[in-house]
Amino acid sequence: MNNKVGNQTIRTALIALTLSVAFSCHSPEGEPPSSEYTVPQDTSRFRMPLAVWRMSGPFAAGDSNSASAMALDDTLYCPQYQVPDLREAYGIADNDTTGVLSGTVTKASCAIVAGKSSECRLIFRSSMPYSLTLNGDTLRRIGIQGTDMFPLRLRAGRNTLVAILRPEGDDLSFEAELCDTLTSAMIYAESQSCNIIYPLIPPETCLVMTTNSHEAVTGAPVRITVDDVLGNEISCFTLRKDTSVHRVPGLLKDVSYMVSMTVGVTTVRQPVLCGKDDDSYLKFHALCDSLPDGHPRKDEAEQLLYRLRFLLDHPSRYEGDWWWQFKIPPVTYQLEHLFAHLGSTYGESPAEPPVQFITYRSEADDSLQRYLLVRPSAVDAGRPLPLVVIVRPAVENPYHFFTSPQMARQWAVNQVQAFSERYGCLVMMPEMRTTLGEDLTPSAMEEFRLALSDARSHYPVDSSRIYLHANCSGGYRALRLAVANPGMFAAIGLYAPVYHCPYGSPESEANAPERSIGMLKGIPMMIHGDPLDRHSPYSMYEDLVRDCRRNGIPLTLSMKRGSGKYYNVTLLGKEAMEFFKDKKRK
């Protein structure tokens, strides 16, 4: 016997003997879990997570059909925390660093039952190397970056989907989602919000380059539209297959535009700049200087110039930060829009940017205050929209609000833009005079109300659908705001929130949320967490869960394995948006 193969066989046998299998299957509907999924009769719009699988393995690498030395033998596996994970499936401790599964293969399978032949899409996410088959045929990935999407041609009756997983590294989880072609186009398009083309267009050629093979996602045409800040269409064209470069005639040097991309029935937007970023700054600096002192929009212009200058001088510009180039046009477009609408104010033009950095003068002391506002493309003054208010975590505090780390993550801001469009809601994050190491002061509480009042004076807000959202230390601040304004919010969504007072002052102790949590009786609350999160473990908000149940607060507890990697660095989460949907304040 070859020594290498022999050692691998012995190692696999030892795995089979030493691993203990732990399963915890739960069904939200109270039905027994099943690894068989039935496609709806109407296959035009559906989205179905595939969480329950039949697992076999581990096998020696390269021998996924062998039945020797199995620890799992076609065993039904339902993940305890939404996401399938081989550590959980095999009962391996989460802190085990021995790599006991390295060099092995696990086979996961499920059945998809279709009433008729149809074409669907499978979205598969895993950092492990893997391969997929449907009814024995190898699946080929669609040629796009960032999303592993596979066409599935289902036959009428029972179809067998198999994933061959090759554990590698620390992350041994995977996620799979089945959907129709139109929904897959929506999912893809939303992931491209503010990321459609490379955002700095050379004015000499007016050539735009797409960031991805957008046209490969769906058989339907992908349309690109370019508008100016007055809402006039400059160009409209359809992407050509296997062509990433397109010429857009009519673009002017040092002018910002709004690019829209329609994939299927979903449209996403992105501001772009035709010209050089430094030249754009000089242009707007001169325009700002030309405004007389006391002009009602000069403060806005100066604050936007401050952010633009900060970005132009930031070291990431020269350190290979791919996202840096995408941070400039949202500011230059807002400046372009501002100077084209000097006689009006924000909230009055459909050509506004989807993400806005807003400055207002506080009624408290006439000082300049700020908030981030994200709006959908369709805003009708006669149809009030839901509003999600994000409370900043403490990590934001040492920085000027318009240059804070959270807003510097362009991909996270893009995600908020996609949520705003999908759910048809406004989203705001106020600065509200918060400082590091300090509890929410009376002035911070008052500025929160003033920021909210300013947003409502410019945008149609449905007062029965105002939601509060925060994570980590922002969760503590959100709870302080909620108990101080119990009649304001229709629902509260918190990600791994700090509950107990982190400040030692007598005032903070007296106003700790735990003392007044009963004020939130009847207000729906969701707490989302990651059972593996060491930065914000469950013990940090365990008492909040208990107090909600004691005080009659309708609580939804959501735990997702591995999600702590993301919610600690994002502004807004999908779980919260789904929870807020359709909830109204009585």
Image (spheres, rainbow, N blue to C red):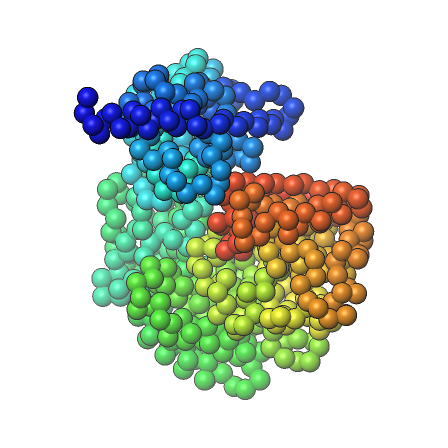
* Residue 32 sits above or below residue 343 on the image: above
The residue lying at 67 percent from left, 63 percent from top is: 502
- Residue that extends furthest to the bottom in the rendered view of this protein: 293
Does residue 387 sit above or below 131 in this rendering? below
| Residue projecting furthest to the top | 157
User: Relative to residue 62, is residue 396 drawn left or right?
Assistant: right
As drawn, is 509 to the left or to the right of 290? right
Please state the horizontal and vertical placement of residue 565, each as a whole percent of the image.
Answer: 48, 49
Q: Which residue lies furthest to the left in this view?
A: 2
Q: Residue at left 53%, top 20%?
A: 34
Q: Look at the picture and state if 418 lies above or below 104.
A: below
Q: Is residue 405 visible?
A: yes
Q: Is residue 547 left or right of residue 318?
A: right
Measuring from the top left, give residue 46's x and y in whole percent. 50, 29
Observer-nearest of 394 and 160: 394
Residue 246 at x, y = what percent?
26, 52
Asked whether 74 or 212 is in front, the reply is: 74
The residue under the point 64% across, 46% down is: 527
Residue visible at 31% across and 25% down in the picture: 10
Report whether residue 119 is seen: no
Of the pair 576 and 326, the residue shown nearer to us: 576
